[in-house]
Amino acid sequence: MGRIYNFSSGPAVLPLPVLEKARDQLVDFEGCGMSIMEMSHRGKIFDRIIKEAEANTRDILSISDDYSILFLPGGASQQFAMVPLNLLTPGSSADYVHTGSWAGKAIKEAQIVGKVNVIWDGKDGNYMAGPDIASLPFTKGAAYVHITSNETIGGMRFTEFPRTEAPLVADMSSDIMSRPLDVSQFGIIYAGMQKNLGPSGNALVILRKDLAERCPDTVNYFFRYKTHMPEPSLYNTPNTWAVYVYKLVTDWVKENGGVAAMEKRNIAKAQRVYDVLDASAFWKPCADKNSRSIMNITWRLETEDLEKKFIQEAAAAGLDGLKGHRSVGGLRASIYNAFPEDGITALVEFMREFEKKNG
Ligand SMILES: *Cc1c(COP(=O)(O)O)cnc(C)c1O
């Protein structure tokens, strides 16, 4: 079996045991004679799977019954629109923290719906550092505050989250379940599944139930959170396969010690790469030291030609997906929960060799 080391930013590497289990159950799920993809989303089997998916989520992140857990289509991008459609009611305004590409997209969607206060913008620092959360100028009476916990493209993250008076809304697409967090600090957490959770095209939404009541009647039923809450995620036919794989991924997270163990492992993995990047001026790490992501590590080399060479030779050595996002260039190693330690060893060894030959 030829598995490469997959540093893709998303869709991204999944735990091998999850893929193997999904393969084994693909054609005939537990002897029922059909695939998960072929059965009713209202049948007994899928009902059990979606309930386990929800229970795993509550268990892993210690989520109380004040919150709904939804699996919605459209990935994180649809949540960029759904959050303001539901919460940015006429006459109100929302605070957004602009930390990079993904925050920028969330802001653009919100601006179509209502008044947006960009209370912090990392533009001057090229979006390589985060704000000092203690001095963020929140707007009194804002409908909510929106942050992007980890900027997948820039490679920066919030190491801590602000405590806000208004509900805190977070796009956690690229670091959900990579570290412990206090869900009660948030009004809404959403995440596209394809980085740490499962297949693309869907989002996990963790939503404080009372917030769903704010949605104006001018919003189409489908885009109201409250439409999806009574029978969770079954208003439309959900992506049953994605929910199933998500359930397997969250089983894996639990079996491997939960988010505390994930964080410990993630910090250790990231540190090994940052240690190489910090060891000589040959490497030019992008993100500010205090804001470095432990999921997406970004760096540059002296010239674009050298970066091209790095990507090519790395790919030839079985290290795939190290090219930076097309909007910023450079190099990026995405090392989500499921990325294995021996892949880090392979990368670090490759980097040392590359430096020897080209430094
Ligand atoms: C990948 C990503 C998105 C976009 O997710 P889609 O599922 O493609 O909509 C949004 N925000 C962040 C932080 C991401 O990493």
Image: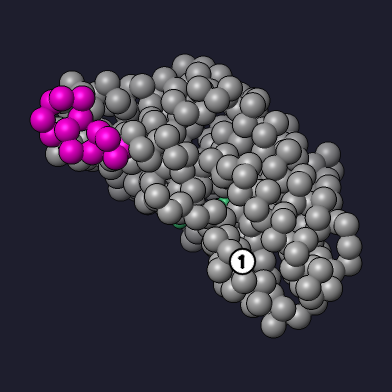
Q: Secondary structure at mark 1?
A: helix
State yes or no: residue 25 in magenta. yes
Residue at 54% over, 54% down: 5
Q: Is residue 170 visible?
A: no
The vertical placement of 153 against 200, above or below, is: below
Q: How is the image coloured?
A: one colour
Residue highlighted by disc 1: 314
Q: What residue type is disc 1 on? A: Ala
- Give x and y (percent) for residue 71: 37, 37
For this view, does 80 lie left or right of residue 232?
right
For residue 160, side relative to residue 359 (left or right) = left
Whether residue 258 is visible, yes or no, is yes
Q: Residue at x 61, y 66 (%)?
A: 314
Write down the region rendered in magenta.
Answer: 22-34
Outermost residue on the right side: it is: 280
Q: Residue at the spot x=72%, y=78% of the render?
A: 306
The answer to which of 118 and 53 lies nearer the viewer is: 53
Which of these two is toward me, 263 or 72?
263
**Which residue is more in the foreground, 293 or 208?**
293
